[in-house]
Image (cartoon, rainbow, N blue to C red):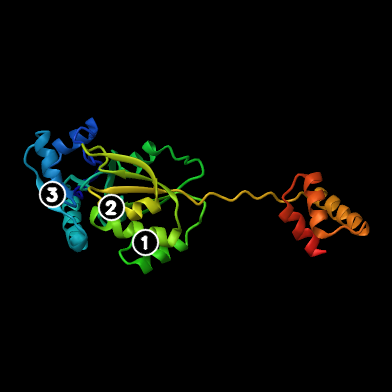
């Protein structure tokens, strides 16, 4: 007896706000697949109704029931059913449940078909103008407690932009914590992306920490602290300066006088010359 072929799991990106932001391919898959798994079935039902996709079997997959529901969905896939996995908004698994389902499906030899779409992460980055040539660090939602946030943020490299998601009811407190942990930094606030009250603003953490009200989901891009310009003395120049210090000492000049002369001669800060004189 031949083994029944397994089903297909479609991982489908959906709009993050504006219902027009969906691909033709995603709509085709949604229309032709009878079982749809989503973190919030209310959101996907609204989308299906808007595009006339017909009645579907909807399965909610939120954090508290993720493991239990995953095994229910895997059973359907192993019976040969086709299933769509969507997020409440955006691309599945980007700070949303579903990773366990996709990994288990891979492990069991079930075919995975990605149907990409919009993401708040890429949307905010592309609208910010941030130079991403050296990379960035995406953290999703930070832990709720400040002590846990501190652990995460203080152990990161300092030379990459940081991107976080945050909900409106937590943003006021998170902004204050970010300012305390990271110091004041330039940042890009992307709020209510693709919606009527969309806000795209370059600001800083100090300003955000003083803001009293945030409405709508937030994507925040935090730039690294600007590097203070260091002007290290070139070895060759350093040797010449040290020689000049000895010469001026023999002439009986005071440190202040020597520093002024050498700073002018070598076009370097007086402070650096003082340091060299003090080092002997």
Q: Nearer the viewer, mark 1 or mark 2?
A: 1
- Sequence-wise, which precedes: disc 3 or disc 1? 3
Most foreground residue, 52 or 125: 125
Q: Which dot marks residue 102?
A: 2
Q: Residue at x 40, y 58 (%)?
A: 179
Frontmost residue, 275 versus 34: 275
Q: Secondary structure at mark 1?
A: helix
For the residue pair 237 and 102, the one nearer the viewer reads as 237
Q: Evaluate if marks 1 and 2 touch, with contact meaning CB atoms under 8 Å apart.
A: no
Please give the residue where the numbered disc 1 appears in the rendered image: 177
Q: Examine the rendering and report whether any part of residue 229 can be seen.
A: yes
- Kindly identify which residue carries mark 3: 41
Q: Is residue 37 left or right of residue 278?
A: left
User: Where does the image place residue 108, in percent across and percent down from the top left?
Assistant: 28, 55
3D distance between C-alphas at marks 3 and 1 = 33 Å
Could you classify mark 1 by the number of other residues whose Cα lies within 10 Å: few (under 14), some (14-19), or many (20 or more)? some
Label whose residue precedes the other's in the sequence (1 or 2):
2
User: Is the C terminus in the top left, top right, bottom left or bottom right quadrant?
Assistant: bottom right
């Amino acid at each position: 007896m031949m083994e029944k072929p397994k089903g297909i799991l479609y991982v489908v990106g959906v709009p993050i706000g504006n219902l027009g932001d969906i691909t033709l391919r995603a709509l085709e898959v949604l229309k032709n697949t009878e079982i749809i798994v989503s973190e919030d079935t209310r959101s996907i039902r609204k989308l299906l109704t808007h595009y006339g996709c017909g009645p579907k079997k909807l399965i909610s997959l939120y954090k508290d029931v993720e493991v239990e529901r995953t095994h229910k969905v895997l059973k359907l896939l192993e019976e040969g059913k086709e299933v769509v996995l969507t997020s409440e908004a955006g691309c599945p698994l980007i700070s949303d449940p579903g990773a366990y389902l996709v990994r288990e499906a891979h492990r069991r030899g079930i075919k995975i078909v990605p149907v990409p779409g919009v993401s708040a992460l890429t949307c905010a980055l592309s609208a910010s103008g941030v130079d991403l040539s050296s990379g960035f660090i995406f953290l999703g939602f930070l832990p709720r407690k400040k002590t846990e946030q501190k652990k995460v943020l203080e152990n990161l490299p300092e030379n990459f932009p940081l991107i976080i998601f945050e909900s409106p009811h937590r943003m006021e407190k998170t902004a204050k914590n970010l300012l305390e942990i990271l110091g004041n930094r330039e940042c890009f606030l992307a709020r209510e992306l693709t919606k009527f009250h969309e806000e795209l603003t370059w600001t800083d953490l100090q300003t955000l920490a003083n803001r009293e009200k945030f409405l709508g989901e937030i994507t925040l891009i935090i730039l690294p602290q600007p590097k203070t310009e260091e002007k290290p003395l070139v070895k060759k120049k350093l040797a010449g300066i040290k020689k000049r210090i000895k010469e001026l000492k023999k002439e009986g000049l005071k440190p202040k006088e020597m520093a002024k002369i050498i700073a002018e001669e070598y076009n370097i800060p007086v402070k650096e010359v003082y340091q060299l004189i003090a080092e002997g």
